[in-house]
């Protein structure tokens, strides 16, 4: 078992164990460039290559994460080998420059994209490129990168300068132990990200089929007959109803009091829901048209309705205010379920309808017309089936939220591990 010291020495604004030495990449291998001389027509077919985005996002690159590029047999292009280390060469900020990855796959003929460079270790008895991939993504490694970042509006890094910089180097066995621990965290994150992707696809399929009646709740199948309608093929027991017949406008006008504070709300695009703005005084509202928020309403941002800026209000928003650009609608009780309505307008078909009711060009000229909105027609199953559909989709949403929370927790745990392992604050036992 290796003897690990508990004494430390300074390195940049950090401290590292006394028994760690400093090394330079130039002492352990050589660099090579990515693809050169390629045009747009060369991509999408041919040999596999590692794209920039995979290196930027991942510390570990494995087989199956590749795009294609045409490479002729006589071309002088560098091929990737197992264990090669990659760096991105350009970014808009120093924080995103020279993100590092290690290739742990076994592809026989693999190339590197034009916007990265590779490093191949020739002294594999002294250095682990898996350790380096994590090191240069850590706060310690980023300090080295910041020092070398060149540029103003866009930042670049010189591979000649990077390989001359000192970096902290434990023994090979400790490097491998650190890399193994961090790789395990990456694997856990990867598994949960795949699970998240599967759940999101499952929810998308469910929403598409439940909201079109192709899939029915077992307790609400009154008939297996379908017919063609202006909204597509629907169950014969579903109605097609104008929104004006099942929605009532809501919201009482506010008469601002000069010295009172008012909490305003906004609605994000892309189905991201309600957010809260800074409180404002009645004096600052002046003669603006604002309304009291009512709970359990469908609410829409008329400027970005076409971009899925829709939500529902809850008791939490009661007593807050919204401008006239955020009209609210209360579903008729026992006829239209609010959650069903929201899921419908979060669907691709719902987005299409919001676009139809928003004439004009792109951006702020494409504004939802309130009268056009109320003239829209939507498919309406029985009230009980609406509730069942919304509950199924809500359950899927909750599962997705839990997976996202788990991913965030794992990322935070990994961040903490990186900080203590790559500064030697925590030492792993080496057999």
Image (spheres, rainbow, N blue to C red):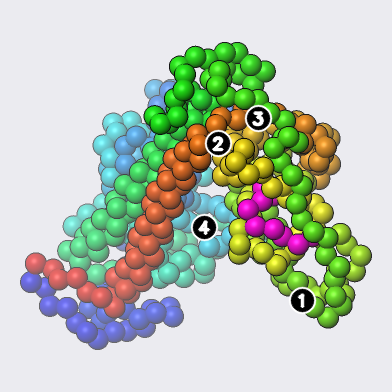
Q: Which residues are magenta?
A: 291-301
Residue 306, horizontal then vertical, whole percent: 71, 39
Identify the residue at horizontal 39%, vertical 79% (top origin). Answer: 14
The quadrant of the image that shows the N terminus is bottom left
* Nearer mark to the viewer, of 1 and 4: 1
Q: Is residue 146 magenta?
A: no
| Residue 70 in view in this figure | no
Q: Which is more toward the observer, 365 or 242? A: 242
Identify the residue at horizontal 31%, vertical 37% (top origin). Answer: 63
Identify the residue at horizontal 32%, vertical 73% (top origin). Answer: 420
> Disc 2 designates what residue?
383
> Disc 1 designates what residue?
261
Crowd tier of the residue under label 2, counting other residues whose Cα lies within 10 Å: few below 14, some 14–19, many 20 or above? some
Label for residue 378? 3
Identify the residue at horizontal 64%, vertical 16% (top origin). Answer: 229
* Nearer mark to the viewer, of 2 and 4: 2
Q: Earlier in the sequence, mark 2 or mark 4?
A: 4
Considering the numbered disc 4 on the image, is that residue within a helix, a strand or a loop?
loop
């Amino acid at each position: 078992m290796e003897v690990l010291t508990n004494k430390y020495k300074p390195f940049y604004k950090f401290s590292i164990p006394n028994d760690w030495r400093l090394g330079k990449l130039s002492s352990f291998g050589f660099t090579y460039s990515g693809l050169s001389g390629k045009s747009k027509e060369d991509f999408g077919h041919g040999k596999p290559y590692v794209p920039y985005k995979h290196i930027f996002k991942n510390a570990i690159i494995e087989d199956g994460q590749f795009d294609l590029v045409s490479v002729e047999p006589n071309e002088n292009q560098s091929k990737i080998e197992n264990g090669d280390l990659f760096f991105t060469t350009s970014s808009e900020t120093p924080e995103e420059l020279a993100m590092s990855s290690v290739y742990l796959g076994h592809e026989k003929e693999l190339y590197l994209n034009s916007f990265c460079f590779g490093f191949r270790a020739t002294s594999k008895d002294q250095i682990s490129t898996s350790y380096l991939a994590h090191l240069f993504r850590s706060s310690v490694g980023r300090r080295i990168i910041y020092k070398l970042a060149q540029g103003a509006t866009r930042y670049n890094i010189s591979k000649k300068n990077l390989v001359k910089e000192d970096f902290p180097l434990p023994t090979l066995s400790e490097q491998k132990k650190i890399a193994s621990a961090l790789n395990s965290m990456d694997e856990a994150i990867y598994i949960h990200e795949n699970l998240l992707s599967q759940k999101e696809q499952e929810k998308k399929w469910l929403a598409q089929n439940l909201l079109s009646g192709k899939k029915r709740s077992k307790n609400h199948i009154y008939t297996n007959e379908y017919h063609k309608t202006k909204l597509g093929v629907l169950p014969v027991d579903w109605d097609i109803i104008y929104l004006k017949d099942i929605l009532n406008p809501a919201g009482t006008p506010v008469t601002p009091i000069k010295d009172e504070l008012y909490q305003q709300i906004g609605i994000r695009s892309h189905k991201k829901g309600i957010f809260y703005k800074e409180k404002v005084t009645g004096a600052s509202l002046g003669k603006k048209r604002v309304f009291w928020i009512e709970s359990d309403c469908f609410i829409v941002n008329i400027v970005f309705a076409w971009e899925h800026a829709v939500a529902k209000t809850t008791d939490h928003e009661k007593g807050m205010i919204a401008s006239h650009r955020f009209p609210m609608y209360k579903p008729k009780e026992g006829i239209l379920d609010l959650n069903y309505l929201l899921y419908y307008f979060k669907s691709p078909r719902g987005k299409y309808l919001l676009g139809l009711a928003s004439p004009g060009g792109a951006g702020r000229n494409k504004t939802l017309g309130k009268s056009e909105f109320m003239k829209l027609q939507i498919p309406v199953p029985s009230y009980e089936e609406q509730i069942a559909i919304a509950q199924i989709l809500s359950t899927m949403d909750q599962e997705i939220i839990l997976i996202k929370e788990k991913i965030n927790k794992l990322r935070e745990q990994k961040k903490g591990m990186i900080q203590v392992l790559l500064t030697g604050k925590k030492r792993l036992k080496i057999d």
